[in-house]
Image (cartoon, grey):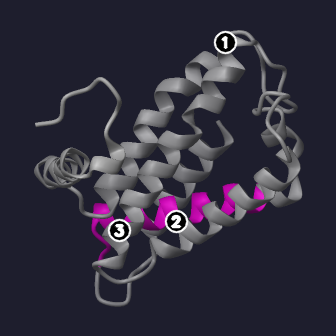
Amino acid sequence: MIFLLALIGATLVAAVLPARFGPRSTRRATRLGMAAAMVFAGASHWTMPTPFIQHLPSWVPAADTLILLTGGIEVALGAALLTRQPWRRLAGLALAAYLVSVFPSNVYVAIAAVEVDGQPGGWYPWFRLPLQVLFVAWALWSTGWHRRQLRSVRRIFDSAHRSTPALAVPGRVHQ
């Protein structure tokens, strides 16, 4: 919930503060808000790592180090949202992929009913799950991605998968 509040708050500040060349577009304000929220979240990994470590199952090795590294990734992705095109769009895609990759830890907290410092239990971990979809969509939309473009990226990965024998799955026929 803190991330959502930081995201909304930073976006509202970005929308209200005057821009150098006139009013800010909604897309730009949402991108600046996401950048600020990601930097805040990444820095939180360094200053308050315990809740983030609690999101990981006990069998994950070097959880402390992993949380510090993911904090760095989040800060870097937030900063990358401030770059020029085409880097900004790539940063949005990388951020969306990152947000999808950390989703299993949120599922783990909900299913295992993990008590996380500073977060209520009960329904709250389940409430957070659909918010991840919002964050992914926010990252993509704010950096200029459209559904049609995402489909073309998916086709590139699909065609690379079909044409690379090293990725072949035993027993599966690739066309």
2 vs 3, front mark: 3
Q: Is residue 59 above or below residue 67?
A: above
Task: Tell me which amino acid carries mark 1.
Answer: Ile
Residue at 65 percent of width and 11 percent of height:
123
Question: Where, quadrant-wise, is the N terminus in this rendering?
Answer: top right
User: Which of 13 and 169 lies nearest the eye of the viewer?
Assistant: 169
Q: Is residue 5 left or right of residue 19?
A: right
* Label 1 crowd bin: few (<14), some (14–19), many (20+), radius 10 Å: few
Pick whichever of labels 1 and 3 is earlier in the sequence.
3
Q: Secondary structure at mark 2?
A: helix
* Label 3 crowd bin: few (<14), some (14–19), many (20+), radius 10 Å: some
User: Which of 84 and 94 lies nearest the eye of the viewer?
Assistant: 94
Type of secondary structure dominating the magenta stretch: helix
Task: Tell me which amino acid carries mark 2.
Answer: Ala
Task: Tell me which amino acid carries mark 3.
Answer: Leu
Q: Provide the residue span drawn in magenta.
A: 23-44
Q: Which residue is mark 3?
A: 90
Looking at the rendered structure, which numbered label has been put on residue 72? none
The alpha-carbon separation of the residues under discs 2 and 3 comes to: 14 Å
Most extreme residue toward the bottom, as rendered? 20
x and y percentages locating residue 15 in the rendered image:
41, 65
Q: Which residue is mark 1?
A: 111
x and y percentages locating residue 12 in the rendered image:
47, 58
The alpha-carbon separation of the residues under discs 2 and 1 comes to: 30 Å
Residue at 34 percent of width and 33 percent of height:
169
Pick whichever of labels 2 and 3 is earlier in the sequence.
2
* Among the 4 quarters of the image, the one containing residue 93: bottom left
Q: Is residue 90 left or right of residue 104?
A: left
Q: Secondary structure at mark 1?
A: helix
Q: Secondary structure at mark 3?
A: helix
